[in-house]
Image (spheres, helix red, strand yellow):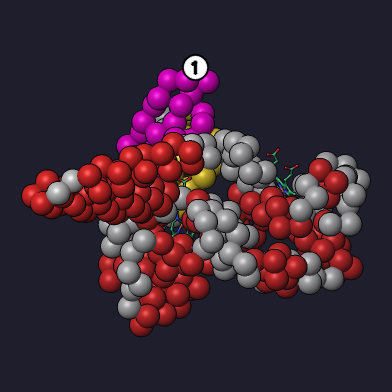
Amino acid sequence: MTDKIIQSLRFVAAAHSNLIGDSRFYFQLALVILLVFQFVLTVRVAIARQVSQQDRSQETYRQQQRPPEDPALIARGQGLYGIHCRGCHGVDLRGGDLGGPNLLRSQLVLRDEQGESIWPVIRDGQTTAGVSSMPAQSLAQDDAEAVAAFIRSVLAKAERQGAPPSADRTVELDILVGDPGTGKVYFLDNCSSCHSATGDLAGIATEISDAKTLQNTWVRGRRRGTLRPSVTVSVTQPSGVRVGGQLERLDDFFVLLSDSNGRLRSFRRDGDVPTVEISDPLGRHTELLSIYTDKNIHDVTAYLVTLK
Ligand code: HEC
Ligand code: HEC
């Protein structure tokens, strides 16, 4: 290879020294043009490479590419997030005790530019049938946009999409701060009508070895990825006719259910007519949510962790 280069250099040098007058000048000019051309080509290739790298990172991680947002807006959003969202989505956005999903992995959040994706979810709530649902949150639009700015700012700082923020380890450790003895007493008072440490929950800490996952599971009454046991409803008409089935939808004006044949049936409601009785296997879990203190939750988790 090098031999070839040296050979061709010799050839160029020889050709050069053989030339005289005008030809010599044109030869030099041609060389210069060749060099300039080569230079422009190299620069263009380098620029193209850089641009395509930028494109690629933009595709994978939009929130890291945008200019930083107003710190005052982010701070206000963070405060509001702590009040309205933290319980369900967690301090670090990775999902909280009350069952909200990890927002760091949400495609919807990743593509949010100015709250246009996040705001409708806050305003209307969101339900994935049979999986989970988020109730509508009463926030004004500008507050919701501040929350969205805060969420985007956390994503911008995360190391890569969905990766645990580096402060995460301390959060994990904070889970096991409860007292197992107090937790046991709480369990006997509040849970033992339906569960038993030697029955259905025996070995739960072996099956679910991660304390945070165990806590999310017992608080929700459901393992991640499993279907919620369905809510049943029984509608009794003034005539005494009674229809029962799986509850599909209930509001002030209608109740919609699917009966045992899978047929949808809807009934108009007018105050207490017809009589509507709901039975939700996880109803008690939902009620308990508003009763637990942080300490209750930590104590019960500390107790359940001992059920190996
Ligand atoms: C009571 C618990 C709860 C509260 C409070 C809550 N969320 Fe949610 N959130 C959920 C659940 C559960 C889902 C998943 C809904 C589904 O399955 O469609 C969700 C979904 C979302 C999603 C959509 C994620 C996606 O990829 O589809 C966003 C965004 C979101 N929440 C933001 C917020 C913000 C911001 C707040 C506070 C203003 C908030 N949530 C308050 C439980 C909650
Ligand atoms: C009124 C009855 C009732 C009470 C009280 C109750 N639960 Fe539950 N719990 C349920 C039902 C129903 C399920 C769902 C079981 C299923 O899906 O198979 C459940 C699910 C669970 C699960 C998940 C079990 C698994 O294997 O996936 C755990 C853990 C749990 N409850 C813990 C508790 C704790 C701790 C308390 C008290 C703080 C409590 N429950 C209070 C009825 C109850």
* 186 displayed left or right of 8: right
Q: Which is more toward the observer, 82 or 16?
A: 16
- Span highlighted in magenta in the image: 245-268
- Please state the horizontal and vertical placement of residue 133, each as a whole percent of the image: 48, 48
Residue found 83% across the figure and 56% down from its top? 304
On screen, residue 96 above or below 60 = below
Residue found 46% across the figure and 70% down from its top? 81
On screen, residue 226 above or below 161 = above
Residue 252 among those drawn in magenta: yes
The residue under label 1 is 261
- Please state the horizontal and vertical placement of residue 87, each as a whole percent of the image: 56, 65
> Would residue 139 be seen by someone viewing this image from the given angle?
no
On screen, residue 130 above or below 166 = above
Q: Main secondary structure of the magenta part?
A: strand
* 167 displayed left or right of 211: left
- Please state the horizontal and vertical placement of residue 90, each as a whole percent of the image: 57, 64
Residue 97 among those drawn in magenta: no
Residue found 58% across the figure and 64% down from its top? 165
